[in-house]
Image (cartoon, rainbow, N blue to C red):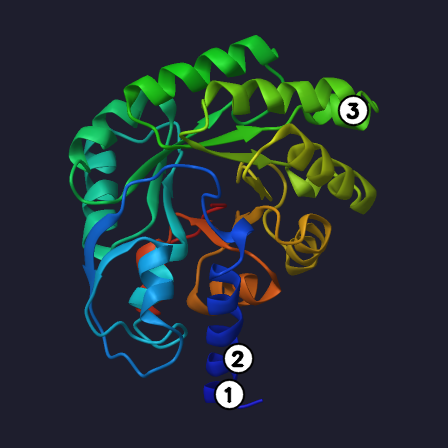
Amino acid sequence: MDKQTLIDTITKQVMARLNQPGSHSQGVKTSSCNCECHGNWDGVGNIADMLEAGAGRVSTIAPLGSCPDPALARFIDHTLLKPEATQADIEKLCQEAAENCFMSVCVNPYWVRTASKLLRGTGVKVCTVVGFPLGATPSRVKELETRIAIDDGAREIDMVINIGALKSGLYKEVENDIRAVVRATRGTVLSKVILETCLLTKEEIVTACKLSEKAGANFVKTSTGFSKGGAKIEDIRLMRQTVGDAMGVKASGGIRDHETALNMLMAGASRIGASASVAIVSCAQPAGGGKY
């Protein structure tokens, strides 16, 4: 398959995915993006799809898969979760997110209020993590974390599943743990469940996806970026196969270039979590390494 055929195939499949209920914030009220994405519209896909995906205004958007790739930006949570991240780092993250029209920034809870102020009026949402990175905090603590984060301005919550409980077969406890966070979102904030797939068997991934769906979460997500592995194509395919169109699937951990991001979307992802987001959409080589 030549490059253009691959690009056309990816574009058609991802645009079709955008029209499916699990690809967006189904049942979740979100603000429209005020970003204007530039490029050369080639007639591939549908402008209405891009508006539905979150763009407040579309100005000749480039086809998904072209380089540079502004259309890809609306699938990306621009992420900085390193414990040593400074205020200056957060400010840079938010500036990059606004300039590139990323879907959100994903930051640690302490920085939610700062990011929310910096991004006010841009259309870029603030995402944060709960029970991060181990998932081993009590459900009532995760619920409280979620409520505080929302009060501070978070509009997406990425919670870590209780991995030990899952592997112990305590499925009702796992479901209730997820449900506590979903309940705290009050139906106005997107909820994503981090499975930490590198620590799970295929059967456990399937079980975790089903429990997440049953508990009412909007997305399942591969990884924290703080364990021994990140997103894998085969795990994305399995997660998408399990949840179908009922939920979104977020690929995160180790996605650092344009080709890998597109491959994740082709496999069934509807969101990408990455720290190398600018390099991904500009098709550049990211500086340095990183797990996220």
**First along the sequence among labels 3 and 1:** 1
* Residue 280 visible to the viewer: no
Could you tell me which residue is drawn at 67 percent across and 23 percent down?
162
Residue 169 drawn at (x, y percent): 84, 24
Looking at the picture, tell me which residue is in the foreground, 60 or 130.
60
Label drawn at residue 203: none
User: Is the C-beta separation of discs 1 and 2 under 8 Å?
Assistant: yes
Identify the residue under disc 2: 9
Callout 3 crowding tier (Cα within 10 Å): few <14, some 14–19, many ≥20: some
**Local secondary structure at mark 2:** helix
Nearer to the camera, 55 or 95 = 55
Q: Position of residue 215 (x, y in %)?
A: 65, 28
Q: Secondary structure at mark 1?
A: helix
Residue found at x 47% / y 82%: 8
Residue depicted at 60% across the width and 31% down the height: 216
- Residue under pointer 3: 171
Mark positioned earlier in the residue sequence (3 or 2): 2
Residue at the disc numbered 1: 5
Q: Position of residue 151 (x, y in %)?
A: 31, 18
Vertical relation: 204 (above or below) 103? above
Rendering coords of residue 53 (x, y %): 37, 56
Q: Amino acid at mark 2?
A: Thr
